[in-house]
DNA sequence: AATCAAGGCAACCGCCGAGCG
DNA sequence: GCGCTCGGCGGTTGCCTTGAT
């Protein structure tokens, strides 16, 4: 038995697929602006379109609906996406609700084509070197950065280095857990350049953020892809920030678990 | 200038829950 | 309670554009 929408009768039409023509857009826009939508499956016939209702609905929501923002995402919007994705997962429609003028499809595309690559989760990283070696590289980098960049808060960098060293000492060296599997051509530095750094070492938030400012980090000469502020990392990973696969940084003590 | 690969994005597909007969 | 449609959502596909060779 084929049920029909109780409000309408829908003649069968041959459904077109593929990109919408300007003429089709105009027909759909005109119809909806004039009549609104009570039943999407009835729209194509009433609007004179050879599309199915689903396709019309999608076209309206993602492209024709008034108030849609076009163009690149702002850094603030990106930050919102990253933050909410970490909280909600791939709930694109919910995330899009926090971004006026953006559709779930846009948010999803932005995530899949761009943001996902900026933030690589530890479990997705691949390397064959040990976690402790990787951390040593981080320390070297920070030390180098501390001496090269005047604007970095020296005390914060120094304290961070000390804290990491302390963590390394506490870390059971017998554990030979690697960061992940595969990708032997990638170095530990490559891996960690995408992850860093929590504000879990009792550093002042202000210093931390100024030290690991994203834009600053991208423009500096560390050969790093992305560094993240404490708040950005926190948004992505909650309290279980960075670290090699299998470890967790607790939020207060700066120790590996 | 031609070709190829990668990235971006619009649209489709398939699933699910709600609502109705 | 069952079967069906509809609308909504997330995943995926495929076309088009752009950049590299």
Image (cartoon, coloured by chain):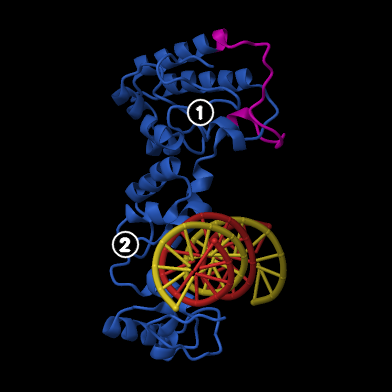
Chain colours: A blue, B yellow, C red
Residue hosting label 2: A101
> Which secondary structure, mark 2?
loop
The CA distance from mark 1 to mark 2 is 33 Å
Does residue A63 lie above or below A188 as drawn?
below
Question: Percent position (x, y) of residue A55?
Answer: 48, 76
- Which residue is rendered at x = 60% and y = 34% of the image? A123
Lower sequence index among marks 1 and 2 = 2
For mark 1, name the chain.
A
Q: Is residue A173 magenta?
A: yes
Which stretch appears magenta? Answer: A168-189
Does residue A221 lie above or below B6 as drawn?
above
Q: Is residue A139 magenta?
A: no
Q: Is residue A230 left or right of residue A100?
A: right
The disc placed on residue A111 is none
Residue A49 picture quarter: bottom left
Question: Percent position (x, y) of residue A42?
Answer: 42, 84
For disc 1, the neighbor class at 10 Å (few under 14, some 14 to 19, many from 20) is many
> Which secondary structure, mark 1?
loop
For mark 2, name the chain.
A
- Which residue is rendered at x = 46% and y = 12% of the image? A163
Which quarter of the rendered picture does the N terminus of chain A lie within?
Answer: bottom right
For this rendering, which residue is in front, A6 or A51? A6
Q: Main secondary structure of the magenta part?
A: loop
- Which residue is rendered at x = 34% and y = 20% of the image? A153
- Which residue is rendered at x = 52% and y = 35% of the image? A194
Does residue A205 lie above or below B18 as drawn?
above
Residue hosting label 1: A242
């Amino acid at each position: 038995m084929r049920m029909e929408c109780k409000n309408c009768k829908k003649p069968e039409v041959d459904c077109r697929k593929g990109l919408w023509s300007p003429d089709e857009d105009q027909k759909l826009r005109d119809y909806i602006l004039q009549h609104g939508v009570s039943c999407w499956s009835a729209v194509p016939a009433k609007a004179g379109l050879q599309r199915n209702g689903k396709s019309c609905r999608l076209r309206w929501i993602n492209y024709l609906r008034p108030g849609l923002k076009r163009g690149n995402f702002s850094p603030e919007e990106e930050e919102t996406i990253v933050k909410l994705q970490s909280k909600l997962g791939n709930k694109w429609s919910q995330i899009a609700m926090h971004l006026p003028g953006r559709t779930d499809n846009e948010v999803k595309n932005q995530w899949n084509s761009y943001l996902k690559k900026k933030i690589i989760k530890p479990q997705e990283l691949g390397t064959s070197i040990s976690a402790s070696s990787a951390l040593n590289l981080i320390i070297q980098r920070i030390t180098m950065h501390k001496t090269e960049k005047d604007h970095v808060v020296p005390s914060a960098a120094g304290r961070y280095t000390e804290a990491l060293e302390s963590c390394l000492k506490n870390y059971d060296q017998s554990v030979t857990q690697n960061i992940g599997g595969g990708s032997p051509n990638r170095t530990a530095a490559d891996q960690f350049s995408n992850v860093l750094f929590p504000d879990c070492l009792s550093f002042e938030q202000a210093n931390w953020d100024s030290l690991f400012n994203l834009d600053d980090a991208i423009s500096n000469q560390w050969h790093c892809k992305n560094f993240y502020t404490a708040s950005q990392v926190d948004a992505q990973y909650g309290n279980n920030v960075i670290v090699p696969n299998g470890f967790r940084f607790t939020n207060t003590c700066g120790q590996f678990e």
